[in-house]
Amino acid sequence: MNGSGEDRYSSNWEKLSKRLRLLYPCAVCGETDFFKKEAHHIDGNKKNGSIDNAIILCKACHKGVHDKSIEIPENFKGYKNCGFSVKVAHPASSREDWFNSKNPLKLIPKLPSDMAMKFRKDCIKGFIKPGACNLYIGLSHSDYLVGVLGFSNPDYGNYDVILKADTTPSEWEYSTDLLLYVLRTTDVKNILSDKFGRDVKTAYSKCFSQHEQINRYRKHGELIKKDKVNGGYDLGYLFQLGTVPSLKAAKSLWMQKHKIT
Ligand SMILES: [Zn+2]
Ligand SMILES: [Zn+2]
């Protein structure tokens, strides 16, 4: 519904609205049906088409917000830091293309699951569709998504959270090792504690391997379960979170480890 003159929407609004409706539910009631949702201008100014000014509401809640019978939830944090504008990584031509860059690493605290799944499909050889994750955290470098950590609430055992995904592009040397340093940072610990509403100190990962250890986990986690099964082993690793003080420290530890300057 593009009006004219004063009422004309900023030109990017339709596109922004469509993409946000694909990714997010109604911020009030959780309605997910794309066709029942609309994007609302938070400040009431239809010319302000910035992502900071957008909130996704279903038609009923949208009407409620306009007639002031419904308020925008206080905890609504906006979509800006939700990985919305991040491109999925393409294979680098060399390791230096990515890891020697001066650009800092950034975390995307709530990565939309469709974006995480696309990344995983594009980046893993022999991708197996995993079970649902309650939360994806993205790792970005420059404007690119270069890693995905996926977590769920534990449904067994005494573990704080289950690590279900640690994905980086398979052809990039040592990239999963970088992600495992990132996993151990206080930044990730804080995001998880915030998401799950309790002090999260450890992440548990259960995996099948033909070998008695998983190389990429060996340095970062503690092997606490090893059961011989048909064709290999069921392994369980426990990771202590918060042992690396920051993302910057994670990157520098990783660079030292692999002698990257
Ligand atoms: Zn509105
Ligand atoms: Zn609604």
Image: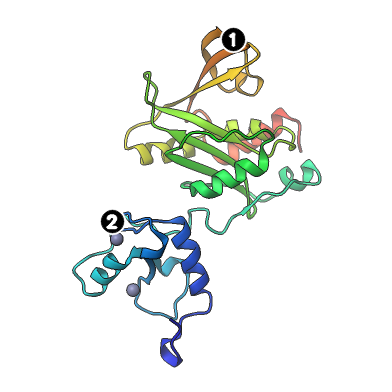
Q: Quadrant of the N terminus?
A: bottom left
What residue would you read off at disc 1?
230
**Secondary structure beneath label 1:** loop
Say which of marks 1 and 2 sits in front.
1
What x and y, as percent, mark residue 74?
Answer: 28, 58
What residue would you read off at disc 2?
29
Q: Name the N-terminal-most of marks 1 and 2.
A: 2
Q: Is mark 2 within 8 Å of ligand 2?
A: yes
Residue depicted at 38% across the width and 79% down the height: 45
Disc 1 from disc 2: Cα separation: 47 Å
Compared to 77, does 229 lie above or below?
Answer: above
Nearest to the observer: residue 65 or residue 176: 65
Give the side of residue 92 with respect to residue 223, left or right: right
Residue depicted at 48% across the width and 74% down the height: 13
Give the side of residue 111 with respect to residue 248, left or right: left
Compared to 100, does 181 lie above or below?
Answer: above
What x and y, as percent, mark residue 240?
Answer: 48, 24
Q: Quadrant of the C terminus?
A: top right
Q: Residue reaching furthest right?
A: 93
What x and y, as percent, mark residue 113?
Answer: 49, 46
Taking the image as drawn, is residue 209 in sight?
yes
